[in-house]
Amino acid sequence: MIFNVIIQLVVVSIMATSAMTWFSYAMSKSFRELYKEPVLLSYAIDKMKIELSPKSKKIWGWLLHYIIGLLFVIGYHIIWVKDILPISPLSALILGVISGVVGIVSWIIIFKMTHHHPPIDFKGYYIQLFFAHIIFAIVATALYSVTLTLLILANAYVTV
């Protein structure tokens, strides 16, 4: 059973993070700004003077982005399992707003810690980041609900 939950959380986090990333890349292209979280993470790694090849920094930027997405989904899972919030569209919106604020504060800290000041419109970046997290939470909530239903049905009707 625990294996099924781990797979569920990994799949949900990959899909939600991918949806968020797609949105950020679309906004980046639309506004001709660098709003791409994996790219900004790789630049932050570079500014921390970690000895890695440029390709490794890019890979780590993407890995960190998806790991952070998994951590958010694990947090959502705990909130839902502990019945702090129901699995609903309203809770998706609430979690998205909270996640957006956490994301913005985290990026402010990352930029300050690394002394990285990319030539971007920070206000625009933080606004799109806020909405990207709402998209993340909506996708995560919807997929979590669907996969939870599938797990319940599989456990009820499939015997091994």
Image (cartoon, rainbow, N blue to C red):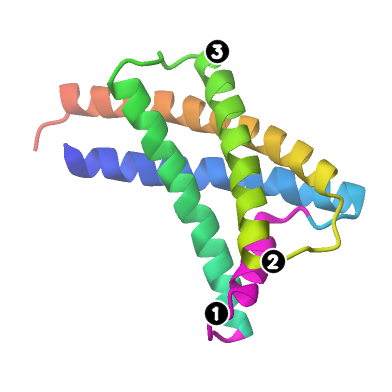
Q: Are marks 2 and 3 in contact (CB under 8 Å)?
A: no
Question: Residue under circle 2?
Answer: 115
Nearer-N-terminus badge (1/2):
1
Could you say where residue 91 lies in the image, as x and y percent from the top left?
Answer: 50, 17
Q: Residue at x 41, y 23 (%)?
A: 145
Give the residue pinned by disc 1: 56
At 62% from the left edge and 34% from the top edge, which residue is drawn?
A: 100
Question: How many residues crowd mark 1 within 10 Å: few (<14), some (14–19), many (20+)?
Answer: few
Quadrant in the picture for the C terminus = top left
Mark closer to the observer (2, 3): 2
Place of residue 49 in the rendered image (x, y in percent of width and height, measured from the top left): 58, 80
The kind of residue on which mark 2 rests is His
Location of residue 129 (image quadrant): top right
Q: Is residue 146 left or right of residue 90?
A: left
Q: Amino acid at mark 3?
A: Leu
The part of the chain drawn in magenta is 35-53
Position above or below: 62 against 95 = below
* Distance of label 1 from label 2 (alpha carbons): 21 Å
The answer for how far apart the CA atoms under marks 3 and 1 are is 39 Å
Question: Would you identify the image quadrant in which residue 84 lies?
Answer: top left
Residue that numbered label 3 is attached to: 90
Q: Which type of secondary structure does the marked residue at label 3 adopt?
A: helix
Task: Report the residue at 54% width, 84% height from top.
Answer: 52
For the residue pair 73 and 121, the one nearer the viewer reads as 121
Which one is in front, 88 or 103? 103
Label 3 crowd bin: few (<14), some (14–19), many (20+), radius 10 Å: few
